[in-house]
Amino acid sequence: MRPSLDLPVALPADDVATALPPDDVVDAVPVPEPGPRPRRGLWQTVRAVAHAIGSAWEWLFGVVTLMVGLAVLAAAPILGFLSLGYLLEAAGRIARTGRLRDGFIGVRIAARAGSIVLGSWLMLLPLRLISDLWRSAEIVDPGGRAPHAWKIGLTVATILMVIHIVAAVSRGGKLRYFFWPFNPIWLVRRLWRGGYYPAARDATWDFLVSLRLPYYFWLGLRGFAGAFLWLLVPISLLALGSKTGPVAGHARSVGAGPDSIRFLEGVLPLLGTIGALLLIALLPFVLFLQMRFATENRFRAFAEIGAVCRQFVRAPWACAFAFWITLLFALPLYLLKIEIVPQEAAWLPSLVFIAFIFPARLLAGWAYGRSLRRQKPRHWLFGVTGVLACVPVAMFYVLIVYFAQFTAWSGVASLYEQHAFLLPVPFVGL
């Protein structure tokens, strides 16, 4: 007798049709109706509200930390390209996605870094107090028992505080961890379990990689170079026009003839006028060529004037409004260039610069992205009025830039700083 095997048997199509239950039987199967949604309890509601408030607070704290970090980077001679690269990447992401929130890159990471810096600074305050007491005791009783005791206390407190800060950072670096008094116990237990050093190494490496510093530096460097090449000729001509008197005086001092001096006095103002007109015409192109570069990450995008013109007529008033804001937000910043600030406080005016330039960059990315998502140009009337609307703002901006060289600390060199398009810093040569 053959053993019976419980294997699936393929039935013919007719047998499958007869094996299925009739439609009335299927319809007769009762379907349970969805019951009422379970009500959220009071504790769950309180936790959800607290979580939302905490998340919003962390985001706002991250934005503030991000602004301060960009200001500190902008004040550094070479690291300023990181700040410019971040602004370009933020504008480019908004242009690609059309979402304003995508421009706030790394806000949560900035919040965590800011909490580590702030928490560490707060934890070092008691050490500073003990250090002051030790120095005061040393002045009152040099070599006595009291200064010696304060010195020992400072050493012990420093060791414990370092362990406390390391443990707080290892737990995640949130601000509340720095106020937890049992961090050293947590660190000892974590070391006892093993695997702490590889985990700390990997977490540190992942954090550094997430910052994308080489990418932002390279993007900012190329964005600076492309915009500077467009602005170099008109700004140089404008600078020559403002140097008519000194150049003519130098020509007299070296014994130049009257004809040469009259030629210089006639040509240099003309070159300055040509430079001003050329700068007025190029400012809109420089802004949106930079936006095109930030969107596509191609240096050749700085040469695609025709493509930028086609994009402008698809959203003329949005682009014109972004151009207005970019120039108008840059004008008040020239007031901060009247008096130079010390090197250690250079980040303070840079913070004001970032606070003005960052929204302008985001708005420029939004306007360029709006033109990318439209397939056809707007009515010619909107295009013409959008172009004409850019002219008075550009003229007023160039006028302020021209007279700012006579009030700025760096003089004619301030014409080349152009923080609205180049490095977001008030003093390039600081």
Image (spheres, helix red, strand yellow):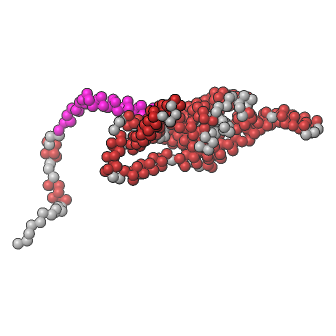
Picture quadrant where residue 407 is located: top right
Q: In this view, does 83 lie to the left or right of 234?
A: left
Mark count: 0
| Residue 83 visible in the current orientation | yes
Q: Going 39% across and 52% down the picture, which residue do you hit?
A: 197
Q: Is residue 245 left or right of residue 354?
A: right
| Residue 373 visible in the current orientation | no
Q: Which of 200 and 337 is in front in this view?
A: 200
Q: Position of residue 28 (x, y in %)?
A: 14, 42
Q: Does the magenta stretch include residue 354?
A: no
Q: Where is residue 234 in the image (x, y as percent from the top left)?
A: 74, 39
* Predominant SS of the magenta segment: helix
Q: Going 15% across and 58% down the picture, which residue do you hit?
A: 15
Q: Which of 119 and 48 is in front in this view?
A: 119
Q: Nearer the viewer, residue 429 or 360?
A: 429
Q: Where is residue 373 in the image (x, y as percent from the top left)?
A: 52, 40
Quarter of the N terminus within the rendering: bottom left
Q: Going 42% across and 42% down the picture, which residue do you hit?
A: 159
Quarter of the C terminus within the rendering: top right
Q: Is residue 201 above or below residue 360?
A: below
Picture quadrant where residue 18 is located: bottom left
Q: Is residue 52 magenta?
A: yes
Picture quadrant where residue 236 is located: top right
Q: In this view, does 308 lie to the left or right of 182?
A: right
Q: Going 45% across and 50% down the picture, which residue do you hit?
A: 205
In the image, which residues are magenta? 32-61
Q: Position of residue 186 (x, y in %)?
A: 33, 43
The residue furthest left is 1
